[in-house]
Amino acid sequence: MTFKSLGVHPALIAALTEEGKTTPFPIQKATLPEAISGRDVLGRGQTGSGKTLAFGLAMMTRLAGQTARPGRPLGLVLAPTRELAVQISEVLAPLARTVGLNSQVVAGGMSYTTQQAALKRGVPIIVATPGRLEDLLKKKYMVLDDIQITILDEADQMADMGFLPIVTQILNLTPPNGQRLLFSATLDRDVDALVRRFLKDPVTHSLENEKSTAGNMEHHVLIVDQIHRDTILQQIAAREGRTIMFVKTKHGADKLADKLRQQGVAASVLHGGKTQSQRTRVLEGFKLGHSTALIATDVAARGIHVDDVSLVVHVDPPQDHKDYLHRAGRTARAGATGTVVSIGTHKQKKSIFGLAIRAGVKLKESFVHPMHDDLVTITGAQEPSGIPVIVTEPAPRRNERSGSSRGRSGERSFDRSRGERSDRPGDFQKRDRAPKRDFDKKEFPKTDYPKRDRDGGFTSRADREAPKREYEKKEAPKREYAKKDYSKPFAEKKKFEKPVAAKPAHKKEERVYKPIVEKREVLRIVDETEQKRRDRVSKPKYPKREDKFNVKPGSKPSKPGARKLSPAKAAVKKSRDNDRAERFAKTTGADSEKKTFRTNKFDPAVKSAARKKTSTGKAAPRALAKGGKKVAAKKPRHKSAPTR
């Protein structure tokens, strides 16, 4: 079966023949006849099976010779990533020119004004990512009313990345009677809902992943010890041929690339932290052979097409079985052969085999160590040179931003033919960075920074200001001072008096002046005011209440009307006072015995005196126990304080 029998345009067949493509792939044989006839097609196949030409040839055959109006494209291809969109455009653009069509990539991280200018001119085929396309639609740079064919490539990845709501809005803006082609590696629930909503009576063609590459791709798992892991990766990367190693994070990719370069392996890095132009230049260097090993994250699992990639290494196990298939699809493309190797420890063995079962792949297990025979046979590993290799990563170009930035990044371009930047219409006029000296106009800008002379040396400030001093000496006019005549007397100053305004009739009474207060009077007033303030502050807030009953006998009440003690209370108080007086007389009389005051009980003098004070005049003997040992006297028991 040939492309002519499938109904492809003759100009496209001639272009494919020049590229050496004369036999269609299975996915192309299955989908091209229905797609060219105008039916909706649902294709399922592994990445690298020829899906791009399958939908591209059908779209270009149907749109051949048509002209698009400004802002109204005729064909739309939606891709999940910039890399995949750029790759699709690179495949379709040479073929589209043979039938009078052209294409434009609409993706984030690329020149905004270039995309706007292309839409204003009119582009028949748009290859876009959902985010940037939605932005241009909101700003009304384009409409989708004239879309005849809508193609969704890698719909399952769009669902994984959360693009399905945006894709649904975009499909709603396309004409309902237009043709829609959907290609995906897997058909999950989200993709199935999209198919049931937008595809009308689709023709389904499904190619099993393991069957399509069973004879071209080998899958192995190498179980290694953790201490030998880095050494084995270095030996695999030093092999002959192109190798792609997939890791989980951007930091891990940079770290692994540095280790490989130190051992003499020319490794380049590709991840989402680089700008679009940096990624493109990294891929160009990998294709041209400047680097033999490419360390990438899952951002490169789709959209990378490099010929003669013979080995794919899973340094870190993928998160899903879909990622495993897409990573493995970077090798054994278009009928070539390749090998897929998963590196894991004994703990990771179970999870790796689980991924392989879900992906429908049979793994061959091997236990290896550095330069093992199985390692050399499977991967072609060899010892690295050990001489550090310097691989210069491409730096961002001028006025280049990453994918998240927007603005006037594309308003100025760089003309490579002339080696200088060319300004586009609408740019502001350039201004000189440093003002020039003009001695004729006496312009001497103040510059304290050093400058170089013609010989390349720095000149001092004094040398730089020497021409200025010479110019001032030469051209500056002499000052002439006017001479004053002191012989004449000074003129008397004129006295200017302010005119007194006439007062109205009702305000013509005489002004009354207040007497002057002497200083002593002022001081007296201040003292009185201060004394009043002190009295007010020292006065108690609540006055002390006087006891009306406990009044001393014979004393007058402080306030008129105060009541005396009742007779009963007065008799009780009198008897209590008499008893108190008698007790006091007994204790202070001559016959009373003097009481000794209590002293410190730990004073040895007090203890010895108390011990001697007995009836016989001798010290009291200490108590002895039955065994003849001394027994300490019992201490009095005291009640402990109540606990709270």
Image (spheres, helix red, strand yellow):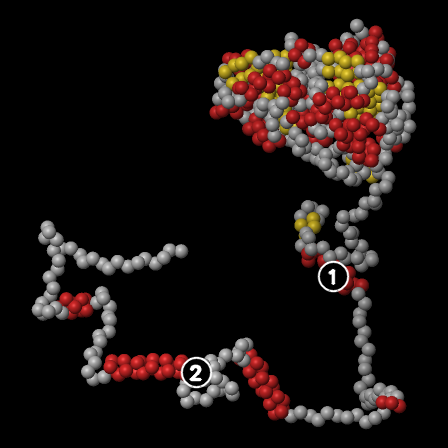
Picture quadrant of residue 299: top right
Q: Real-space Cα distance between discs 1 and 2?
A: 114 Å
Image quarter of the N terminus = top right
Mark 1, residues whose alpha carbon is within 10 Å: few (<14), some, or many (≥20)? few
Whole-percent x, y for residue 352 in the image: 57, 19
Taking 590 as reference, is 376 left or right?
A: right
- Asked if marks 1 and 2 touch (Cβ < 8 Å), the reply is no
Asked whether 290 or 515 is in front, the reply is 515
Name the amino acid, label 1. Arg
Taking 473 as reference, is 211 left or right?
A: left
Whole-percent x, y for residue 103 in the image: 83, 24
Taking 564 as reference, is 290 left or right?
A: right
Mark 2, residues whose alpha carbon is within 10 Å: few (<14), some, or many (≥20)? some
Residue at horizontal 26 percent and vertical 58 percent from the top? 637
Asked whether 108 or 243 is in front, the reply is 108
Residue at horizontal 26 percent and vertical 83 percent from the top? 585
Taking 643 as reference, is 237 left or right?
A: right
Picture quadrant of residue 516: bottom right
Q: Establish if 199 lies above or below 497.
A: above
Which residue reaches farthest front? 568
Q: Name the mark on residue 565.
A: 2
Residue matched to label 1: 469
Residue at horizontal 41 percent and vertical 89 percent from the top? 554
Whole-percent x, y for residue 640 in the image: 32, 57
Asked whether 354 or 265 is in front, the reply is 354
Q: From where the camera sits, is residue 385 visible?
A: no
Whole-percent x, y for residue 535 in the image: 55, 82
Residue at horizontal 10 percent and vertical 50 percent from the top? 627
Name the amino acid, label 2. Leu
Mark in the foreground, 1 or 2: 2
Element on which disc 1 rests: helix
